[in-house]
Amino acid sequence: MTVVCVFPRSPIAQACVPWPMVSLAAVRKQLEETREKFRRLQHEKAVQEARGEASHIFKTVSKKTASNVFADPSWVQPTSDPPNLFPIGREIYVESLRSLLEPALRGGAGRNVFVVGLPGTGKTLTIRFVLAQLKENAKDTAQSIGVVFVNAGRTRSPYHTLVESLKSLGVDVPPAGWQLGRMKDEFERQRENRAIIIAIDEADSLVSKTREQLLYYLNRQEKVTLLLITNQWDDLSKLPARARSTLQLAPLIFESYTKEEAKRILMERCALAFKPGAVDDEVVEIAAAFAAGIRDIRAGFNLLSTAGLLAESEGRSKVDLVDLERAERAIRPTI
């Protein structure tokens, strides 16, 4: 302990009190502790403010809140259907299917068809459109014809594929409990007095050696026509030789949309999805070129939808080329 006194020899010196010497290191430590406490308080304050803001991030959104950009964004969702299900740019395939299935309208069996093409080329949409036309024609002409569309990628087994097929024909089948023999008997009753057309999407789920028995069975039935839809031509080679020989599939190969076809589709969708003036022709032209280059029309929907969201997030009412560029960078890793 050191005594600090200004006048060591004066009488006042006797009244001097001891004053501890404080080292520079101790001062620095105390200063750092004070700074750390201040930083901690600042952080806690920021957290509280952020929580307050986060609890109200949707406060400006309600059903009554109008979008600056979109009229109905569902029209540019990748899985959305076009108006009236009409497959723009797939007219040649519609005509081919009409010719192949025409005999079924006369009570017989049409040609079995192997429908193949990359994702986003309109295969499923075109088949569904043609089947809807078949149903409508049968209703108008009082014809009895069974029309089935089933996704084997969802049913995942021959048994459940047959269950869904029977349901489409109006049979009340429980999801489990019926033996395969009983379902076959019911199916044969259903086709006694009418032709049946069965479209199987993602048919690659049924073409393996252990699962092709359903296709073989269905093809052996009179007045039954099969449409097998898949993404790869090689799936046909997975069928055993006896199944290929029996089916005698007519190939229908869907090519990717051209730029002009993609533009027609996107123009139609933009007119429904966006507000007037929100998307101009140049934006659609670039989006169409992008979709044609990717060889998937859904990529065009994704691009326009993302660009619209970017414009809206910044409070703008018009999608520009910068929005398209940013949207492309955002979605390309997911394509």
Image (cartoon, grey):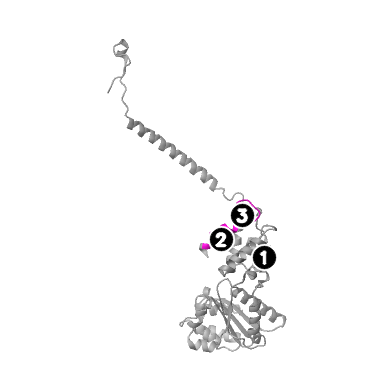
Of the pair 120 and 150, the residue shown nearer to us: 120
Q: Please indicate, yes or no, whether residue 177 appears anywhere in the rendered image.
A: no
Crowd tier of the residue under label 1, counting other residues whose Cα lies within 10 Å: few below 14, some 14–19, many 20 or above = some
Majority secondary structure in the magenta region: helix
Which numbered disc covers residue 328? 2
Q: What amino acid type should be assigned to the residue bearing mark 1?
A: Met
SS label for mark 3: helix
Q: Residue 161 appears at what percent x and percent y?
A: 53, 78
Q: Residue 121 appears at what percent x and percent y?
A: 59, 73
Q: Residue at x 60, y 64 (%)?
A: 301
Q: Are marks 3 and 1 in contact (CB under 8 Å)?
A: no
SS label for mark 2: helix
Q: Residue at x 29, y 14 (%)?
A: 8
Between discs 2 and 3, the one toward the N terminus: 3
Quadrant containing the N terminus in the rendered view: top left
Q: Which residues are magenta?
A: 314-332
